[in-house]
Amino acid sequence: MNVVLIGFRAAGKSAVGRRVAEQLGWPFLDTDLKVEACTGRTIAQIFEEEGEAGFRKKEGHVVREATASDRTVIAVGGGAIQNPENAVALSGNGYIVLLTASVAAIEKRMQLDTTSLTSRPALTGFNPLEEVEHMLAARNTAYRELCDVTVDTTEKTLEQVTQEVMDRIRALPAMERA
């Protein structure tokens, strides 16, 4: 069994994933970083050169490769779960944790993380705040249908979110065997 973190950009998937992996003594895999490492290009460059479809194809390959592992903490890109094949692969061998945050918190985190603004492509013609609202509305149903548990990160520190995720994981019957 893997632990899979899903959610919108800047919800905390990578940071929380690294901490959870450390506490479990498991490897951590960020699918966005893996796509970049495999291609030698940023996600923004892939979008620019191949469009969203080209990126999603690469992302799907990485997601399915990651889910073939066991006892791995996997953070997936915000849109990965919209591909039904990815959703099946992730849920087939993973405990799915949805990290959420308010639109205002996401926008603030994106502004603080200047690499996010330059390395992550805009997916709509909206300004950043409107894009977050639009994309969250478009993805919310898929996130909620796939997840086993939801953790709101809006008003919590990294340590608090990590602890809440770990508490949920430790309560799983499968973790008693891990």
Image (cartoon, grey):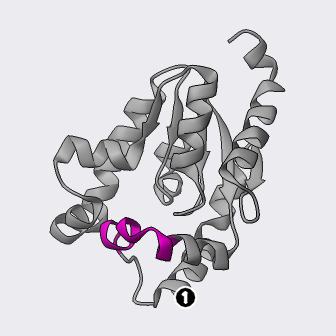
Residue 56 in view in this figure:
yes
Where residue 68 sits in the image (x, y, percent)?
Answer: 45, 24
Seen in the image, is 34 located left or right of residue 132? Answer: left
Q: Which class describes the residues within 10 Å of circle 1: few (<14), some (14-19), or many (20+)? A: some
Where residue 118 sits in the image (x, y, percent)?
Answer: 31, 72
Is 37 situated above or below 8? above
* Quadrant assignment for the N terminus: top right
Q: Give the range drawn in magenta.
A: 110-121
Closest to the observer: 46 or 52?
46
Q: Is mark 1 on a helix, strand or loop?
A: helix
| Residue in the image at 44% along x and 35% along y | 29
Where residue 143 sits in the image (x, y, percent)?
Answer: 65, 57
Is 58 situated above or below 120? above
| Residue in the image at 27% along x and 66% along y | 44
Closest to the observer: 54 or 74?
74
Q: According to the image, label 1 marks what residue?
A: 130
- Helix, strand or loop: magenta stretch: helix
Seen in the image, is 43 located left or right of residue 25? Answer: left
Q: In which quarter of the image is residue 126?
A: bottom left
Where residue 65 sits in the image (x, y, percent)?
Answer: 38, 31
Specify the amino acid type for callout 1. Answer: Glu
In magenta stretch: residue 73 = no
Q: Quadrant of residue 61?
A: top left
Is 25 situated above or below 37? above
| Residue in the image at 57% along x and 27% along y | 22
Closest to the observer: 111 or 68?
111
Closest to the observer: 95 or 107?
107
Q: In which quarter of the image is residue 176?
A: top right
| Residue in the image at 59% along x and 36% along y | 19
Seen in the image, is 121 located left or right of residue 8? Answer: left
